Image (cartoon, coloured by chain):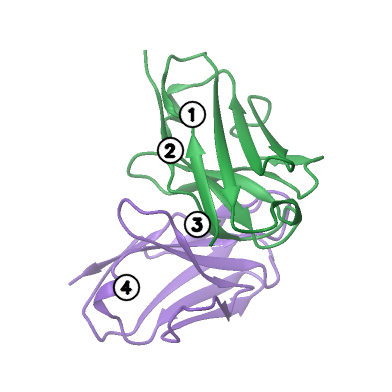
Amino acid sequence: DIQVTQSPSTLSASVGDRVTITCRASRSVDKWLAWYQQKPGKAPKLLIQEASSLQRGVPPRFRGSGSGTDFSLTISSLQPDDFATYYCQEYNTYFLVFGGGTRVEMK
Amino acid sequence: QVQLVESGGGVVQPGKSLRISCAASGFTFSRYGMGWVRQAPGKGLEWLAVATSFGTTGYYADSVRGRFTISRDNSKNMVDLQMNGLRLEDTAVYYCVKGVGHNYGNPFDYWGQGILVTVSS
């Protein structure tokens, strides 16, 4: 089975900062990687699929990139609403795997 | 608008069974894969199972294969998760999820509000 490793597990940042979260798969998943945002007590929200395709309504400050085994989610200018936990998910195979999550907290 | 509403959660003893259900609306249910994802208290997301659009095939995470069974009824727009042999570590919020496509290998664009299953003696 594929393993998916996210880093960092926690990220401290300020409003306006550029932040980057990385996700590494143990073997190639081509472009089949998604990113989700989850706020406390809420269900996750799909932000990006196919590594870089933004879901409708997601602000363009969110950008996904990468292919194969190495991916990243970049928030170009962190906004107050962006403090949350972010998860990547590979869906290249029958068995879908989430990364461990990255909590973006206020510095 | 798309809605996924879970029901059937609660407290159950170790080794017992529980069936949770999800009622879907707002989209053509029979065209999309449906699944279940859980989140243990204070932990990350864990994919559990997915049923393809025709419901003939289910795919499972190693942690629940052989104990959990996903099923769907396209005539009722419902997807269920039958959970047998429950363990303490199955305690979690269980989310019903809709795939972006009809098959198994898809991300999930809609999520239910989640339902708590607590396994405790």
On the image, the x and y values in percent for residue A106 come to 20, 70
Quarter in which the C terminus of chain B is drawn: top left
Answer left or right for B23 relative to B88: right
Q: Is residue B61 visible?
A: no
Q: Amino acid at mark 1?
A: Gly
Residue pictured at 59% horizontal, 48% vertical: B24
Residue B115 numbered tag: 2
Q: Amino acid at mark 3?
A: Gly
Q: Residues within 10 Å of mark 3 (few under 14, many from 20)?
A: many
- Give the Cα distance between marks 2 and 1: 8 Å
The answer to whether mark 4 and mark 2 are in CB contact below 8 A is: no
- Marks 4/1 in contact by CB < 8 Å: the verdict is no
Contact (Cβ within 8 Å) of mark 2 with mark 1: yes
Residue identifier under label 4: A82
Q: For residue A99, which numbered disc appears in the image? A: 3
- Pick the residue in front: A64 or A68: A64
Q: Disc 3 and disc 4: Cα gap in Å?
A: 19 Å
Disc sitting over residue B8 in the figure: 1
Question: Would residue A96 be seen by someone viewing this image from the given angle?
Answer: yes
Of badges 3 and 1, nearer the viewer stands: 1
Mark 3–mark 1 distance (CA, rounded to whole Å)? 28 Å
Left or right placement of residue A107 versus residue A51 in this view: left
- Report in which chain the residue with disc 3 lies: A
In the image, residue B6 lies at what x, y percent? 50, 40
